[in-house]
Amino acid sequence: MTYDKPTVRWGIVATGLISSWFVKDIVLERSDAKANHFVQAIGSSSVEKGQNFVKEHLPGKSPTIYGSYQELYTDPNVDIIYIGTPHAFHKQNALNSIAHGKHVLCEKAFTLNAAETREVLNAAKEKGVYIMEAMWTRHFPLVRTLQKLLHKDKVIGEIQRTFCDFAMDMKIAEKGPESRLKNPALGAGTLLDIGIYSLTWSIIGLEPPLGMGEKPLTAAPEKPKILAAQTLSDEIDISTSIILHYADGRQGIATSNAVVKSSSPSFCRIEGTEGVVFVYGRGPSMPDYFTVRKLNGEETKYEFEKPGMGFFWEADAVAVDVAAGRTESTIMPWAETLRVMEILDEARRQGGARFPQDPRN
Ligand SMILES: NC(=O)C1=CN([C@@H]2O[C@H](COP(=O)(O)OP(=O)(O)OC[C@H]3O[C@@H](n4cnc5c(N)ncnc54)[C@H](OP(=O)(O)O)[C@@H]3O)[C@@H](O)[C@H]2O)C=CC1
Ligand SMILES: O=C1OC[C@@H](O)[C@H](O)[C@H]1O
């Protein structure tokens, strides 16, 4: 621990898979850490589950363990709440955190739909607290470097097209009806779980981030035309295809599929007037490296060190933002979270997947 960096005390809502990845990562010793992270408290459906979680994923640590989320929201020693519940609970978990004056990092997809997102963002604005969608991939140095090469240095010229895919065999048929991957009331389907990454990579490829090139930090998100189709099984989408079509001709194709595991070594291809970028990794949420191939055949590979899984980069960003008194991130700003949710809504409107919580109209 060093005293020249912000120090944050995290409260963790839920003890599922993602929370285990997150806590293990943020307590790693790192030479480049921009903040000191403490897992201060865990909120779970039972104290026993919380204890098992700590024993397995935080050995040697002794956070306070609560058998409810409510006790976590009211813990005065917690600065920021991390929400790792299924999509359908994000809205209420976030509203409860905000009501108790806590800052929030909420897993993707931020909520079930854009109406819920607006409700949460309005509450955060009113209360003056920080909130960010945990689209962790956007914080990777790999992504920040790629954005600079594409949109500032223009290493492949003017970007024209992207093809991004997330396909994994989710074995949905084997899941019980209450699984978050099967139950529409929990926000199941490929779109919010993995399609959101294909969409994110399309945006990373096709649009400069805020503050880069001629794009000011205050720029509103672009609004490409959306064309989408879905295949539904037991009311949830098992495949979704989205086309982003921009007025100037840029095209993005974003797909997700729960039946096959993609065997392609690259999950994203970004084409420009002077070359092409291929992004590789264990999947779109965990990119490992990318290559830049110029039209003359010259190819450069960009590799990056990653001491853990990479969740500490988003955690660092939250800590630095909060210490600076900001209520939103410039990497994943509120308007971007809302724009992404609106695109997901539009894809579901055209494709047919519905959640029982969707507004009726
Ligand atoms: N960034 C990434 O790479 C990843 C992100 N995610 C995101 O994280 C979120 C959670 O996913 P994941 O960790 O895989 O989910 P899990 O099913 O593994 O865990 C969810 C946890 O939420 C709590 N919970 C509360 N109510 C329910 C309920 N009705 N049904 C099930 N769980 C409930 C439980 O914790 P408890 O009993 O302790 O209260 C449960 O363990 C989703 O938003 C998902 O999209 C998921 C995987 C990877
Ligand atoms: O966010 C995610 O990324 C990795 C996937 O394995 C997982 O299902 C998804 O929620």
Image: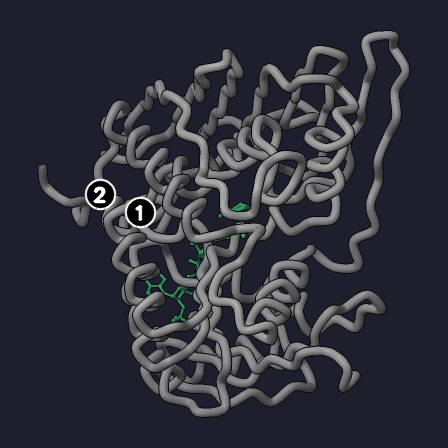
Q: Quick check: can you spot residue 22?
A: yes
- Disc 1: which residue: 187
Q: Is residue 23 left or right of residue 357?
A: right
**Looking at the image, residue 163 lies above or below residue 280:** above
Check mark 1 vs ligand 1: CB closer than 8 Å? yes or no.
Answer: yes
- Disc 2: which residue: 355
Q: Is residue 251 left or right of residue 212?
A: left
Which quadrant contains ligand 1? Answer: bottom left
Marks counted in the figure total 2
Q: Amino acid at mark 1?
A: Gly
**Looking at the image, residue 52 lies above or below residue 316:** below
**Residue 313 pos. (x, y %):** 67, 59
Label 1 CA crowd tier, 10 Å (few <14, some 14–19, many 20+): many
Q: Secondary structure at mark 1?
A: loop
**Looking at the image, residue 321 lies above or below residue 177:** below
**Looking at the image, residue 55 lies above or below residue 281:** below
Nearest the eye: 276 or 355: 276
Q: Quadrant of the C terminus?
A: top left
Q: Amino acid at mark 2?
A: Phe
Q: Is residue 3 left or right of residue 128?
A: right
